[in-house]
Image: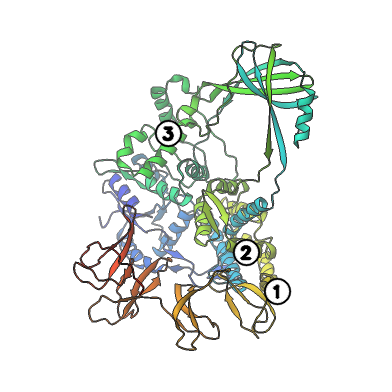
Amino acid sequence: MADSPLIIVESPSKARTIERYLGGEYQVLACNGHVKDLPGKKLGVDVEKNFAVQYEVLPDKKQVLKKLKQSASKAPSIYIATDPDREGEAIAWHVATELNGSSGKVLRVLFNEITSDGIREGMDDPRDLDQNLVNAQQARRIIDRIVGFKVSEFLWKVLYSGLSAGRVQSVALRLVCERHEEIVKFKPEEYWILEVALKTKNGEPFTAKLARVSGEKVELKNEAAVNDIMAKLENASFIVDSIEKKEVKRKPYAPFITSTLQQDAATRLKLSPARTMRIAQSLYEGVELGGGEPTGLITYMRTDSTRLAPASIDGARSYITSQYGAQYLPDTPTLYGQKKKNVQDAHEAIRPTDPSRTPDSVEQHLEPAQIKLYDLIWRRFMASQMNPSIQDRTTIIIKASDTDFRVSGSVVKFDGFRKAYPAMDKKEDPILPSDIVENDKLERDRFLPEQHFTKPPPYFTESSLIKELDKLGIGRPSTFAETLSRLNKRQYVTRDKQKLIPTEAGLTVNQVLTQNLPDIFSVDFTAKMEQELDEVESGEQDYIDVLHDFYGPFRTSMESVEERRGKIKKSLMEKTDEKCDKCGEPMVIKWNRRGEKFIACSGFPDCRNAKSLDGDAEPEIVEKPCPKCGSQLQIKRGRFGRYIGCEKYPDCRHTESISTGVACARDKCEGELVEKTSRRGKVFFGCNRYPDCDEATWNRPILQPCEACENHYIEERINKTKGTFHVCPKCKTEAELVEAVED
């Protein structure tokens, strides 16, 4: 295979699948994603020289590139088949430049699906690298780097280090925070609903709701308004004024695009967007279905096109006819138009590569999450080519004096596309009386008034936030999962029963950005930037012009906030009524470098009095004096977990680890086990002589000899089956904890 043509893809699993399909005709290697990027610790963009970019080979890709260069030097032709989108084009460009892409033997191929037909189709239609796509991705990367680098640095200076800002991320945070503030400020208003319980002449009961008074819609603001209507209708006759029956059709949904897949997977399957995309990637790259032959089950999953290949539509129509019946099949195929400009139409909607490959037929070969997502994609695609569902909707209007009451109900006449894609809505329609006709006089049983209060808008969920970002044109569907992951990773939001609630840090960061850089982090600015990037992709704009148009206003805004940085930082300090016990100046609440709030003297730096913000809780006392000043020692919490510190901090800075009193079990080590905290914030216990001794355990050691082997300590362990129990780490014998008895 040394002289065989070379195909380069992104992932090893995709490489194996393609190589098997091509039967040894080609050598297929993986570049494992990006091979070059901007430098990690500096801007890497020269804004004074037309945004010249300094790309660097990623450290972990040097060996990968070395292997690719060796194979490429012997190959008669090279085909780069990275993912068919902007980012894939940029990766292909970086790989090509490293492999002497100007030599003329490097071509680009696109695989919309990893199947035999999809691969052959791609290989039959190679092309040159699309520089417009590359430039669109370059422009995005440069803008995101400038915004992230410059604004994050500003946040570090006015708040604390470790914070981040992003062109799309910060606007998404803004939406979450504004919704939260709307909910907090919301004042519920009282309103009433008035229903009446009625009976037909044959005694069938049903209820109807007040709709109009004197032909106008009425709002019942309070109980007095309800009582007025009930009093007026006390002796009124209730007559059936009209019965309207009409057929209501519900058209099927379009097949999935990236944003709708993420939304439905979150709503129906409770999958995070990031996990949805990981699972979809595995289904696209190929899964072994028996016989060791990997098969791509879905088309490429980063797309905002609803286009479907004619062959896939033919396959769906054939399956629908044979499995559901001819009544479910439209006379002509259903095509879906694009609602947005500049969609990624180089590939299709997300669909199964083979419509006849049902979820049941592949279930045994897939992981549980894979089969759930594949089932969702398969059903949505199949439903998109089925007839609409049909309901018979009946509306009855009952008159009483000049007042109209209304009751409606629906009956499914034909389930249509819902046969494949059932609705989630479980709300049941009211049961309508069967023996009712117009002009019937009804018997009033009683009025049913109910008090209600208006509710605030709901918190965003991951699904609804993606829908909002997509609607507003903020970011690309392929980046939504990463955007939401960053909000969680930076602890700007928390999830509570699917709801995205901003943290205090998130609210503060949003306050700083929206008050001081309102234009940069506005919805309109971000959406306009996405449109301009789309125009770079289509060749309508030059990417350097777009960068200059962005950077001029951005630089002006950043220069302005830098001039006001001291005032901005001071404005973030919360005033308190407390006076400094050292100098009498007011105490204020600040953020420290670890992202924690503390209370400090406003006279800083002349007075450095400060203390933690632990509310009114009494500090945990250590029963020994400070060896430096003789004051009381306390258990405190810092960046690296709990520790022992002097109560006179910052005048006395003595600290020490929290000891377990258990000697280190390592031979010839004279250390002891102390409490520590891992990088992920999990407590563990390790030797205080680290790094000379790396003895460590996740289980809390307790100074109590084991009765079975006389080891000098036991461990506290916890699992779901036993709860908390104690065991010797040496002989694994379970032990009863002996409680200390005071004399």
Q: Residue at x 56, y 68 (%)?
A: 149
User: Which mark sits nearer the N-terminus, 1 or 3?
Assistant: 3
Q: Amino acid at mark 1?
A: Lys
Query: Under tag 2, what secondary structure?
Result: helix
> Type of residue at label 3?
Ser
Query: Can you tell which mark lies on residue 582?
Result: none
Examine the rendered structure and indicate whether residue 716 appears above or below residue 240.
Answer: below
> Which residue is denoted by mark 3 in the rendering?
312
Kind of element beneath mark 3: helix
Above or below, comparing residue 692 to residue 330 in the picture: below
Q: Secondary structure at mark 1?
A: helix
Q: Marks 3 and 2: which is nearer the front? A: 2
Q: Could you say which quadrant of the image residue 136 lies in?
A: bottom right
Question: Is 209 or 242 nearer to us in this picture?
Answer: 209
Q: Does 270 sit left or right of 566 as displayed?
A: left
Q: Is residue 560 left or right of residue 72?
A: right
Q: Residues within 10 Å of mark 2 (few under 14, many from 20)?
A: some
Q: Which residue is mark 1?
A: 567
Mark 2, residue position: 508
Q: CA distance from mark 3 to mark 2?
A: 50 Å
Q: Are marks 1 and 3 in contact (CB under 8 Å)?
A: no
Residue in the picture at 76% in, 21% down: 234
